[in-house]
Image: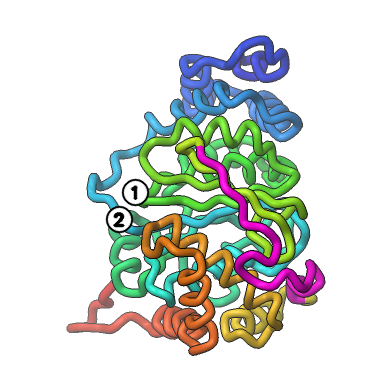
Amino acid sequence: MHLAILGLLEQRAPVARETWRSFWDQLGDGSLDRAQAVALLTSLATRLPDHETLRHLLDSLAERRPARPADRWPGTVNVVGTGGGPRTFNISTASAFTAAAAGVRVVKTGSRAYSSSLGSVDLLERLGIRLTSSYEQTGETLERYGIAFAGPFVYPAQLTRLARTVAPLSMKPFGRFLNALGPFLADLPVTAQVTGVSAGAPLTELGALAGTVTDRTLWLTSNDRGADELLGFADNTVHTNAGDEFTVKAGELVSSEGGFDDLAPAADPASAPDHFLSVLGGTAGEVATRTVCLNAAALAVASGHLTDWGRAVAAAEEAVRSGAARALAERIRADRARPPARTGGAARV
């Protein structure tokens, strides 16, 4: 059995970067069998290791990435959560559209559902909104719409190799680990990142891991209701990678009325796009609107677009009430649905 797996099982000391390098080498050359790949994922999903082991794991993956463009996307924020909290509609995706409609540059990362009926990727697919496939395309989409949804290219290729190695076993049983570490795996040249941490995710370990991130402002948000989003009816805490911590109390910025019943997802996944658009249009109920606007405000403040939370909430509410948030989503859908223009018989892409 590989030393990385033994280290995770014994947990006597952090698993070193060199050990992870060896694991990925053997995975790549085919000398690591399916049983060991399953054992590794099972161990990670059962009990997340210490933050030093996680940092070494992330570093061992980062050094294998192909080089990305050196240019950064100033003033841009990535929003992604750990999942695993109470069942709600896709709040972070709705807040991304709303913040973008209010002038915040947003790149959204996410995945298919591991612990919910529809992940952000599943929802976008049903909406007819495609993910970007390269840094160049992401940058162009960001310039055009003020928002982009980054595809799998931002994640380490070794995860795809792991999925193929354990096949036909699905990756879904390992969703706890993938959800928890996913926000740290995406490689994006953003200014800030806002990550909601649910009660099921290891906040202490992720907080220590966040403290090692130096290339962007990183916020981890949590609350006393166990959701991985800010809630108006909960006491929320924001932990930053600078070591600061502040609270957003229930009722402090938006009304504290309502509960999770007001944030429930569409009863039928087939109706999720219509329900989602009603959220963006402000017709899915006041609690839904307030929740989306509160989270959109966090994106505005974390990115530096605005510094005052009250103004940020007001700007998000205006984006919803004016129809700008829904119009942005409809515009992207319409543009993506159009066939490529043709010039001289050749398709333009």
Q: Decide if residue 283 is on the left or right side of residue 321.
A: right
Find residue 189 and name its label: 1
Q: Earlier in the sequence, mark 2 or mark 1?
A: 2
Find residue 279 and name its label: none
**Location of residue 206 in the rendering, given as x and y in whole percent from the top left corner:** 59, 36
Label 1 Cα crowd, 10 Å radius (few <14 / some 14-19 / many 20+)? many
Give me the C-alpha separation between circle 2 and circle 1.
6 Å
Find residue 73 and name its label: 2
Query: Residue 107, located in which quarter of the rendered image?
Result: bottom left
Between residue 163 and residue 56, name the one nearer to us. Answer: 56
**Location of residue 284 in the rendering, given as x and y in whole percent from the top left corner:** 69, 83
| The stretch drawn in magenta includes residue 195 | no
Between residue 78 and residue 257, name the one nearer to us. Answer: 257
Label 2 Cα crowd, 10 Å radius (few <14 / some 14-19 / many 20+)? some
Q: Is residue 173 above or below residue 100?
A: above
| The stretch drawn in magenta includes residue 252 | yes
Q: Amino acid at mark 2?
A: Trp
**Location of residue 246 in the rendering, given as x and y in whole percent from the top left corner:** 57, 48
- Magenta stretch: give its range: 244-266
**Location of residue 152 in the rendering, given as x and y in whole percent from the top left corner:** 47, 52
Disc 2 to disc 1: CB gap under 8 Å:
yes
Disc 2 is placed on an element classified as strand
Query: From where the camera sits, is residue 34 visible?
Result: no
Question: Residue at left 63%, top 84%?
Answer: 278
Question: Residue at left 66%, top 41%?
Answer: 167
Q: Is residue 78 above or below residue 163?
A: below
Disc 1 is placed on an element classified as loop
Between residue 266 and residue 24, name the one nearer to us. Answer: 266
